[in-house]
Image (spheres, helix red, strand yellow):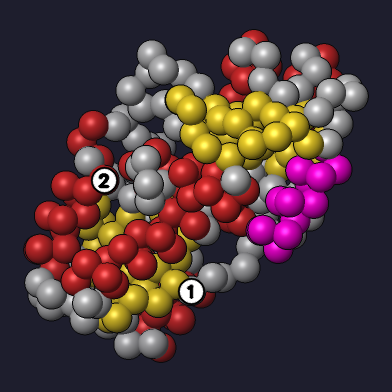
Amino acid sequence: MKRTKLVNHLNELLKPFQINDYCPNGLQVEGKDTIKKLVTGVTASQALIDAAIEKGADAIVVHHGYFWKGEDQTVTGMKKRRLQALLKHDVSLFAYHLPLDVHPELGNNAQLGELLGISIERPLEPWNKSSVAVKGKLSQPITVEAFAALIEEKLGRSPLINKAGDHLIQTVAWCTGGGQSFIDLAASQGIDAYLTGEASEQTIHSSNEQNIHFFAAGHHATERYGVKALGEYLAEQFKLDVEFIDINNPV
Ligand SMILES: [Zn+2]
């Protein structure tokens, strides 16, 4: 398919213009005009680029791209090597950050919720149009240990757990990636447990002092599923050859 058609379709689907973000969303690096093979992955790291080139990809779609607000604007070192590899092989890079967290079906939060059997009831900040964290409910109350086991089974890694009290878990708030700062908001809404990718030192105090169980299941591990679902959607919609490449990251 034509690259321009894919750009337009993705922008219509994910509506990046509706969200305040820290990076440009959409086509970040322009490659060849026609796309047959597409690789998806969490982060546009050198390892993902090299793997995509090896597979003969014409374009890469990621959740974490480049050109973050506040980053060094020069094209040197690691950034030079990444861009050089893309440009040399005429490979396009598409990146969708927050728009891919919040999409109601293909988004990271929706996909993680589906994987764990928690349906989204509403955003954690209904007043904020760019809100990423969400709130939902398990079909029945379960123990902290059972919820941790469920995460480990579905994500293939054991989460960091902070048990804060004896209560069971039924209501859950979550935000994939580095969403640990939302724990206080979740606690203020009386939610049983908060799940995200990463933890900070103060997250544990927030958890303990506000009786909200906390789980950090990995930034990478919680954000595999949105871009993977997006790739599967594109494969079906446009008969593209799409491959998800998981470059392991322990964080
Ligand atoms: Zn992220």
Cβ at disc 1 under 8 Å from ligand 1:
no
Image quadrant of residue 33? bottom left
* Residue farthest front in this picture: 140
Give, as a single range, the part of the protein colored magenta: 144-156
Mark 2, Cα crowd under 10 Å, few <14 / some 14-19 / many 20+, is many
Q: Quadrant of the N terminus?
A: bottom left
Looking at the image, which residue is at 28% across and 60% down? 94
Mark 1, Cα crowd under 10 Å, few <14 / some 14-19 / many 20+, is some
* Residue farthest top in this picture: 188
The amino acid marked with disc number 2 is Leu
Left or right: 224 as drawn, with respect to 15: right
Horizontal and vertical percent position of residue 229: 40, 60
Between residue 240 and residue 66, name the one nearer to us: 240
Is 147 magenta? The answer is: yes
Image quadrant of residue 128? top left
Horizontal and vertical percent position of residue 40: 39, 68
Residue that carries the numbered disc 1 in the rendered image: 245
Q: Quadrant of the C terminus?
A: bottom right
Looking at the image, which residue is at 83% across and 36% down? 143
Question: Is residue 167 positioned above or below 238 on the image?
Answer: above
Residue that carries the numbered disc 2 in the rendered image: 14
Horizontal and vertical percent position of residue 9: 16, 56
